[in-house]
Amino acid sequence: MKALSKLAGVLSGPKYLAVFALSSALFGILLSFTSGIVVVGFWGISPLADPVRIGMVSAIALLFGLNAGVLLHNFDERRNAAGSTGMTAMGAFAALMASSCPLCQPFLLFSLGLGGLSALMAGLGILVGAFSMLMLTVSLGRSLDVGNAVCRASKRKEGGG
């Protein structure tokens, strides 16, 4: 419940709520086209799109938007507190995209010359989506901890560990 209250605190700022809504919507639209849920020539939902895939794409888009809003919040907090550079935020965003984005994973594999591996993973779309949701959830939890200046090492020392 702490995470939900922290998330509500972040999203109470109109700037972060707007980033969440806009990035969720844009990423959801992009994923809908790339995952075959929306058919371009027909401009409608594919009759072959199953409810599990639609739900998964929606959850990934929402988690992505939440991560983007929290990432911007953390960047603003760090910039206000210590004058950090934009490279930290860009590195975090790049790591988020490379590790958990189901759209970026195939492009990353192709850029590394592993296109055949990407083709083998095509049948594992549900597993890749589940892994993406897991990674986005872990990233969100850690970002909420970092944004509120929680240091796990100091917690262990205080707790006697």
Image (spheres, rainbow, N blue to C red):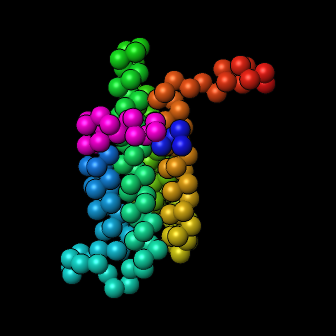
* Identity of the residue drawn at 41% across and 29% down: 74
Direction right: furthest residue? 161
Q: Residue 58: where, in percent of width, then height?
A: 38, 63
Q: Quadrant of the N terminus?
A: top right
Reply yes or no: does residue 15 show up in magenta.
yes
Q: Residue at x 37, y 42 (%)?
A: 68
Residue 93 visible within the image: no
Seen in the picture, residue 148 relative to 52 is either above or below; the reply is: above
Q: Is residue 157 above or below residue 30?
A: above
Q: Is residue 122 found left or right of 24 in the rendered image?
A: right
Quarter in which the C terminus is drawn: top right
Magenta residues, dominant SS class: helix
Residue at point 53% right, 75% down? Answer: 123
The residue range painted magenta reads 5-19
Report x, y in % for residue 62.
38, 54
Residue at the (42%, 44%) spot, across then down: 67
Task: State yes or no: residue 18 in magenta.
Answer: yes
71 horizontally vs 46: left or right: right
Q: Quadrant of residue 12?
A: top left
Q: Nearer the viewer, residue 132 or 16?
A: 16
> Which residue is situated farthest in the bottom direction here?
47
Q: Position of residue 89 (x, y in %)?
A: 40, 31
Is residue 50 visible to us here? yes
Residue 101: percent from left, percent from top: 45, 54
Q: So how many labels did they put on this image?
A: 0
